[in-house]
Amino acid sequence: MMTRLLAPGLLLLLAACGDPALRYAVPQVTPAERVSIGFSSVEVRDVELPLYAQSEEIYVEDETGALVSSTDLLWADDPSRASTLELARALSSLTGVVVAPEPWPFDLFPAARVEVRVEEFVASRAGAFRLSGQYFIAALDESGRDRARLFELSAPLPAEAGPAEIAAARAAAMAQLAETIARDGLR
């Protein structure tokens, strides 16, 4: 009887002993210059990613255009959460104003809200990390400066890029998005 109880536990233990998945963090990119904006504070809503990009697996476009991933190569953080934090940090560094992800942590409401809906978030076979979609600026004052803009950005990837290079290219693309939003949406 005792061996029947031990067998399932032993199988679970052996299954857990396989090679662990590798997780890759996205490095921080520090903006080179400041951008003046027309708002004193900005809230960044959770970045909406396409279904495949919501997964912790790192997706890459293959030569047929299919998006493929491996359960052995993972992002270090939830992609939506990480993208939201990347964008908030980059906007804060770029603008010098108070920027925070939702939920807004301060007593006074923000002057503006940024919402980003991503359509494409992938390392392409063409040697670039592609990031495209639409962003929205909601002015929370009486200025009427609400905006909706499309974006299509890319950051270069070396041939035969690995997960660390993909993570660096993703960081560069997100930094470009922050600059685009600051220059074209928040002025």
Image (tube, rainbow, N blue to C red):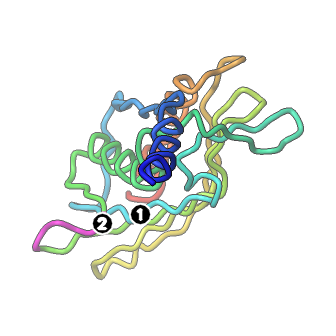
Position of residue 187 measured from the top left corner of the image (x, y, whole percent):
38, 57
Position of residue 159 measured from the top left corner of the image (x, y, whole percent):
72, 17
Q: Is residue 107 above or below residue 168?
A: below
What residue lies at 82% left-to-right and 44% top-to-bottom? 66
Between disc 2 and disc 1, whose residue precedes?
Answer: 1
**Count of marks placed on residues:** 2
Magenta stretch?
A: 102-107
Amino acid type at image mark 1 = Asp
Label 1 Cα crowd, 10 Å radius (few <14 / some 14-19 / many 20+): many
Q: Is residue 31 left or right of residue 108?
A: right
Observer-nearest of 92 and 57: 57
Q: Quadrant of the N terminus?
A: bottom left
Quarter of image, res 13: top left
In the image, is residue 138 part of the stretch drawn in magenta?
no
Q: Main secondary structure of the magenta part?
A: loop
Position of residue 124 measured from the top left corner of the image (x, y, whole percent):
73, 35
Residue picked out by circle 1: 46
Amino acid type at image mark 2 = Glu
* Dot label at residue 77: none
What residue lies at 42% left-to-right and 39% top-to-bottom? 76
Observer-nearest of 138 and 87: 87
Q: Secondary structure at mark 2?
A: loop
Quarter of image, res 27: top left
Observer-nearest of 146 and 168: 168
Residue picked out by circle 2: 102
Position of residue 4 measured from the top left corner of the image (x, y, whole percent):
50, 52
Q: Secondary structure at mark 1?
A: loop
Q: Is residue 140 left or right of residue 156?
A: left
| Residues at marks 2 and 1 touching, judged by CB atoms closer than 8 Å | yes
Q: Is residue 22 left or right of residue 118?
A: left
Task: Spot the residue most to the front.
Answer: 1
What residue lies at 10% left-to-right and 73% top-to-bottom? 107
